[in-house]
Amino acid sequence: MPTLLDFRRRIRSVKNSQQITRAMKFVAAARLRRAQEAALAARPYAQELVRVLRSTMARIQEPQHPLLERREEKTALAIVLTGERGLAGAFNANILRKASEFFRANRDKKVSTIAVGKKGRDALKKAGFTFAGEWVNVLARVEFKTAREIAKLATDLYAQKKVDSVYIIFSEFKSVMAPNLTVEKLLPVEAIREEKGSSEEQESAKTAEVQVDYIYEQPEAQLLDKLLPRYVETQILRAMLESSASEYAARMTAMESATKNAGDVIEALTLYMNKVRQAAITKEIIEIVSGASYGS
Amino acid sequence: MLPESIELVIVTPERQLLRQTVVEVTLPGGDGCLGILPGHAPLITELGIGELTYRAKGTSEVGHLAIISGFAEVLGDRVTVLAETAERPEEIDVARAEEAKKRAEQRLASASSDPNVDWGRAAIALQRSLIRIQVARKRHGAPVSTE
């Protein structure tokens, strides 16, 4: 039977853990706010870029560009965005599950990967995947520079026909409670034509189509050559920002429930400890009383 | 009928910098400066490194921004600038720009003797720092001297 001292130690240790989880929760909440703001601030650029690209594509007769070229998909590249650290509930596990689903669905193709985030890299490496590239310790502070590097590698591989398509697997940030695992096709760029935007966007796309042709300061091909890679970069940046926001959201929720569970454990332990103490006291009293009655 | 004003939208990957109704915009196009007035024919251009100026509706005050690469789409009543970097004069760190200028100048000076120096990159770095310094001088109030 555990002694009182054992209980006190146990309770103290759970309390310490609870303090840590509580602190982590607050840190995650603060970072989440920042990540959400960053994701929000990046949205206008992405929207405007898509709008400009769409209206450019609508005006150009049969746009030609290596990044638009559709090939039979024999090889695919998957960019997997995970977290840098654990203790975020099922965040990393969910993404990795989605990724392995993707790999299974594309078993007939040769799939290579780019791992972004330490957790994903480690897990995929253990599973025996070879990487076309890997980026770790980049998601704590998402920078455009990183997105650009990743985009460059992906577009180069695509343009050199080493891969026939590029997908990005990440957790989209919808709300704190509901992560939304997404597989998006980055290359060839076809989202521009199919993407269903808000009604306002469609409206402006429609009016843009009936308007006259642009004056091109630079040749069309040169513009596409700049616009399309930028589009890929922006998509990757968006995915990184969303992924980091979801990671913090997942960590916040996980730490909140950990703090609550620790509270429950402390309560149960305290109750049990009091019972044991009570039992010990009762026993002592009985001993004294019975000792006294013998003596008299 | 021609529109009387232009809606100027300036965005960078990190943020939306400006959304304002203006009557005149000058863009640092990749192949030279472009002056845009309301009702301009639709145009799309690459942007170089340079200064963007605009005049807001109803004022004579001129706003300045340092722009580093990107695109601009001009429609009759709307100008969209997708810049890689865009900074207001008051946001520019002049000391840093001066330092970058010095570094770039040194690199350019040693380019002929040192094969490791990337002349193109140094030239772009110099251009960038010069534009930043130029735009920073147009800050409201006294000209910048000590920073």
Image (cartoon, coloured by chain):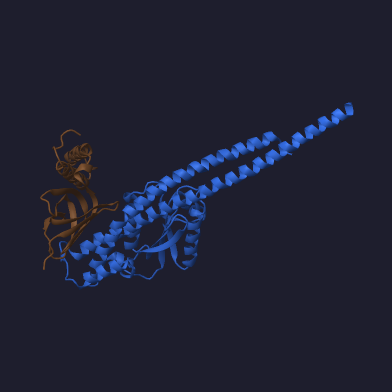
Colour given to chain A in the rendered image: blue
Q: Is residue B82 visible?
A: no
In the displayed structure, B111 sits above or below A222; it is above
Total marks in image: 0
The residue lying toward the viewer, choosing from A133 and A33, is A33
In the displayed structure, B57 sits above or below B117; it is below
Residue placed at 66% from the left, 37% from the top?
A: A7
Residue A86 percent across, percent down from the top left:
50, 48
Does residue A78 appear to the left or right of B111 in the view shown? right
Q: Residue furthest front?
A: A296
The residue lying toward the viewer, choosing from A23 and B51, is A23
Colour given to chain B in the rendered image: brown
Does residue A35 appear to the left or right of A277 in the view shown? left
The residue lying toward the viewer, choosing from A276 and A63, is A276
Q: Is residue A179 visible?
A: yes
Residue placed at 44% from the left, 47% from the top?
A: A29
Quadrant the N terminus of chain B occupies: bottom left
Residue A167 percent across, percent down from the top left:
40, 62
Does residue A190 appear to the left or right of B114 in the view shown? right
Residue B147 percent across, percent down from the top left:
20, 34
Residue A87 percent across, percent down from the top left:
51, 48
The residue lying toward the viewer, choosing from A284 and A237, is A284
Does residue A2 appear to the left or right of B78 in the view shown? right
